[in-house]
């Protein structure tokens, strides 16, 4: 019998929900292409549009304003372009001279490095020691931009919740500032959707981006969500057959989309109860950490965070060593965002928060999800206690 493991890396990817597995399996039996006009094609189209409704309901959007992509990265890269256009009431589109991109210093790499603006046309919005964006700086920068470039438009990107610390950003307040200066606001809601209530209208964001595998759906499917149908894009990355209202050409990933829809519906229905349950488990994990090592720092703790996320560091313990040892002891955590190289990298998020590099070198992230239970927290804390005790023993021998 396999030894029990505690999977505490849901922000990297969360295990697929049974409802999504069932939906994907059903989708694989549908023979039709959603673009075909015969009965099989119409059945496939109907299933896809039902999923579109389910994803839209998760974030308070209209189904017509959902565009499916291959994931959150493609969704972000597509939207963050100077080719964005603003259409007024269905009349002719006017090219938005989006000559400036402002994004928070703690954004995911696909926003910081994957946008399609020229290097000199993108700037970082500072964050404070808790990871919150500086809205005063944003207001001043947009005002200066408006004075320097009359008639031009800025595009601002602020994620709704940080993937490493779980800190929830003041997106609604930022949207008011951005719109006051004639700009557009995008928010990467990949980590927030399914964990906290998300309503694109209430947030005032012009566009949100989502990823299915963060909420228990299949990997390789995501979405752009628009608040209205008034945005268009001059430089669409994928041209061809006109699928997804012309935003993304190519036959749709029907199994992925239908699985995404099932996961979105399941997450939406369980949202309130699940968030409360995970918050209790997260708080228990953090209380246990502080009991084991009172000098442990929990990043972003004074401000509102996702109920499932805890980023922490204990002085003297290094992340790379901790991850390997915890894995061998049955606990799967992360040092921050999932990296394609599989290596532990220094956190740009903690750097932006001006955390002491000696402390950030030991930063770990525990992220909980629908499979997490009390036994997982117990297993992790027992393992961490051994590591803290071993570190204390090494320190005592060195001082002797």
Image (cartoon, grey):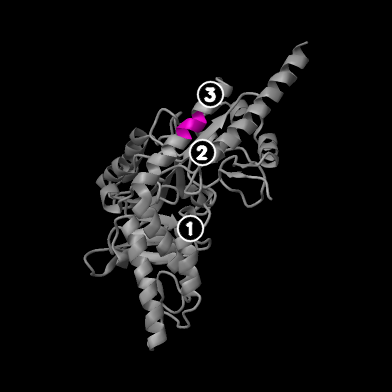
Q: Which mark is residue 290?
A: 3
Task: For the C terminus, give its image quadrant.
Answer: top right
The secondary element bearing badge 1 is classed as loop
Q: Quadrant of residue 56?
A: bottom left
Residue 313, given in percent of the width and then of the height, sits at 58, 29
Magenta span: 282-286
- Any part of residue 311 in sight: yes
- Which residue is most to the front? 1
Q: Going by the image, does 67 lie left or right of 90? A: right
Residue that carries the numbered disc 2 in the rendered image: 374
Asked if the residue at tag 3 contacts the one at tag 1, i.e. Cβ–Cβ closer than 8 Å, the answer is no
The answer to whether residue 283 is magenta is yes
Residue located 50% across and 57% down the image: 213
Q: Nearer the viewer, residue 352 or 388?
A: 388
The secondary element bearing badge 2 is classed as helix
What distance separates the C-alpha of mark 2 from that of mark 1?
19 Å
Residue located 63% across and 52% down the image: 340
Residue that carries the numbered disc 1 in the rendered image: 17
Q: Going by the image, does 301 lie left or right of 375? A: left
Residue 368, given in percent of the width and then of the height, sits at 50, 43
What distance separates the C-alpha of mark 1 from that of mark 3?
32 Å
Q: What secondary structure is the stretch in magenta mostly built from? A: helix
Task: First in sequence, mark 2 or 1: give its number.
Answer: 1
On screen, 200 above or below 374?
below
The answer to whether residue 397 is magenta is no
Task: First in sequence, mark 3 or 2: give its number.
Answer: 3
Asked if the residue at tag 2 contacts the one at tag 3, i.e. Cβ–Cβ closer than 8 Å, the answer is no
What distance separates the C-alpha of mark 3 from that of mark 2?
17 Å
The secondary element bearing badge 3 is classed as helix
């Amino acid at each position: 019998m396999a030894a029990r493991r505690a999977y505490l890396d849901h922000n990297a990817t969360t295990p697929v929900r049974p409802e999504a597995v069932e939906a994907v399996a059903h989708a694989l039996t549908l023979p039709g292409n959603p673009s075909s006009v015969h009965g099989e094609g119409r059945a496939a189209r109907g299933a896809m549009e039902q999923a579109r409704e389910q994803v839209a309901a998760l974030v308070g959007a209209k189904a017509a304003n959902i565009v499916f992509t291959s994931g959150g990265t493609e969704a972000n890269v597509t939207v963050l372009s100077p080719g964005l256009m603003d259409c007024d009431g269905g009349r002719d589109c006017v090219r938005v001279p989006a000559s400036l991109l402002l994004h928070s210093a703690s954004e995911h790499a696909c926003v910081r490095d994957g946008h399609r603006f020229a290097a000199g046309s993108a700037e970082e919005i500072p964050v404070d020691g808790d990871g919150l964006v500086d809205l005063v700086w944003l207001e001043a920068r947009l005002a200066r931009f408006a004075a320097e470039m009359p008639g031009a438009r800025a595009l601002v990107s602020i994620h709704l919740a940080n993937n490493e610390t779980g800190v929830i950003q003041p997106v609604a307040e930022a949207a008011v500032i951005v719109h006051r200066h004639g700009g557009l606001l995008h928010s990467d809601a990949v980590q927030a959707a399914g964990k906290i209530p998300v309503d694109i209208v209430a947030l005032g964001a012009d566009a949100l981006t989502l990823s299915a595998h963060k909420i228990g759906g299949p990997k390789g499917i995501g979405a752009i969500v628009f608040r209205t149908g008034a945005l268009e894009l001059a430089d669409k990355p994928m041209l061809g057959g006109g699928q997804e209202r012309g935003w993304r050409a190519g036959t749709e990933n029907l199994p992925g989309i239908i699985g995404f829809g099932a996961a979105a519906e399941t997450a939406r229905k369980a949202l309130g109860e699940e968030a409360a349950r995970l918050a209790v488990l997260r708080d228990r994990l953090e209380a246990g950490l502080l009991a084991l090592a009172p000098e442990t720092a929990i990043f972003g703790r004074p401000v509102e965070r996702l109920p499932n996320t805890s980023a922490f560091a204990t002085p003297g313990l290094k992340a790379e060593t901790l991850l390997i040892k915890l894995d061998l002891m049955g606990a799967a955590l992360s040092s921050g965002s999932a990296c394609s190289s599989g290596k532990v990298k220094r956190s740009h998020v903690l750097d932006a928060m001006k955390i002491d590099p000696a402390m950030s070198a030991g930063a770990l992230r525990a992220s909980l999800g629908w499979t997490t239970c009390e036994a997982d927290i117990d297993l992790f804390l027992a393992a961490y206690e051994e590591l803290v005790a071993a570190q204390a023993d090494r320190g005592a021998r060195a001082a002797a």
